[in-house]
Amino acid sequence: MLSWGAGRPRGLPGQTARGTDRGREAGEAEGAGYHSSVRIRHSSFDARQHRGNEPGQQESAAQRERPSKSQLKREMTALQELGEQLLGLSLARLRTLPIPEKLYEAIELAQRIRDREGLRRQRQYIGRLMRDVDPQPIRDALSQHGASHRAEVAAMHSAEQWRERLLTQPDALDAFRHEHPQANPQLAKLVASARAEAGAAQHGRHYRELFRLLRDTIAAGQRQADEQPEGPGA
């Protein structure tokens, strides 16, 4: 026969099981709360990411990449100035430039128009055509032509100065040959003939031939100097 004291241990396993169940339920509840908070945080992060990709922000970025009104105005002004520069060129020079045939024909017509209002409308039409043209190749071609033209003008001025020196200064011939050793051997004879014509009322053929010879000699020397490779220390 069991005593009261001996019966208590039989009640302990039941009590322990109930306590374990309650602990497990508490742990599961705590775990569910943790996962719920993690899901909330991820949802908030996703929402922020979604808001960062909203169309309004994309449009703002696109607007920042667009040129400003002042920049567009400067570009349009530059195109107008380029069009005016093209209007002042000869048709032969225009043919050497990388411009569309339609633009060439418009400029050709504008150069033949004498009516002020008609010319104004034609200029506007040329301006509209210029909007569809890449201006940089045209500017590059004009720049190269401008540099060549400036070199030709410089050679002409130098030839005029040398001609006057050769006709008036005895030692000028040696100075020119020293500066331009590639000069034509017939230069001395041509200088003497031009001096003989100096007393005439009008300059004769040798005077003009001397100028052309000096101009060509100076221009050839300049081209050779431009083609010389730069030294290692340059």
Image (cartoon, grey):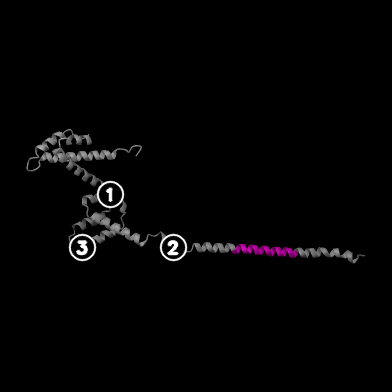
Whether the residues at callouts 2 and 3 have beta carbons within 8 Å, the answer is: no
Quadrant of the frame with the N terminus? bottom right
17 drawn magenta: no
- Secondary structure of the residue carrying tag 2 is helix
Q: What numbered label is drawn on residue 143?
A: 1
Query: Looking at the rendering, in which quadrant would you find the C terminus?
Result: top left
Residue at horizontal 26 percent and vertical 54 percent from the top: 101
Q: Amino acid at mark 2?
A: Ser
Q: Position of residue 118 (x, y in %)?
A: 20, 62
Dot placed on the residue nearer the N-terminal end, 1 or 3 = 3
Main secondary structure found in the magenta portion: helix
Circle 1 Cα neighbour tier, 10 Å, few/some/many (<14 / 14–19 / ≥20): few
Give me the disc on residue 60.
Answer: 2
- Residue drawn at x 34%, y 60% is 72
Whether residue 102 appears in this view of the structure is no
Q: Can you give x and y, in whole percent of width and height, for residue 114 in the image?
A: 17, 60
Question: Residue pushed farthest right?
Answer: 1
Residue sitting at 65 percent across and 64 percent down? 33
Q: Is residue 158 above or below residue 118?
A: above
Task: Please tell me whether residue 172 is drawn above or below residue 148 in the rendered image.
Answer: above
* Residue 7 visible to an observer of this rendering: yes
Tell me which numbered mark, 2 or 3, is placed earlier along the sequence: 2
- Using the image, determine if residue 213 lies above or below residue 89: above
Residue 218 placement, left or right of 75: left
Q: Magenta region: which residues?
A: 21-40
Question: In the image, residue 31 lies at what x, y percent?
Answer: 67, 62
Res. 118 mark: 3
How far apart in space, not on screen, are marks 1 and 3 (Cα)?
31 Å
Q: Residue furthest left?
A: 201
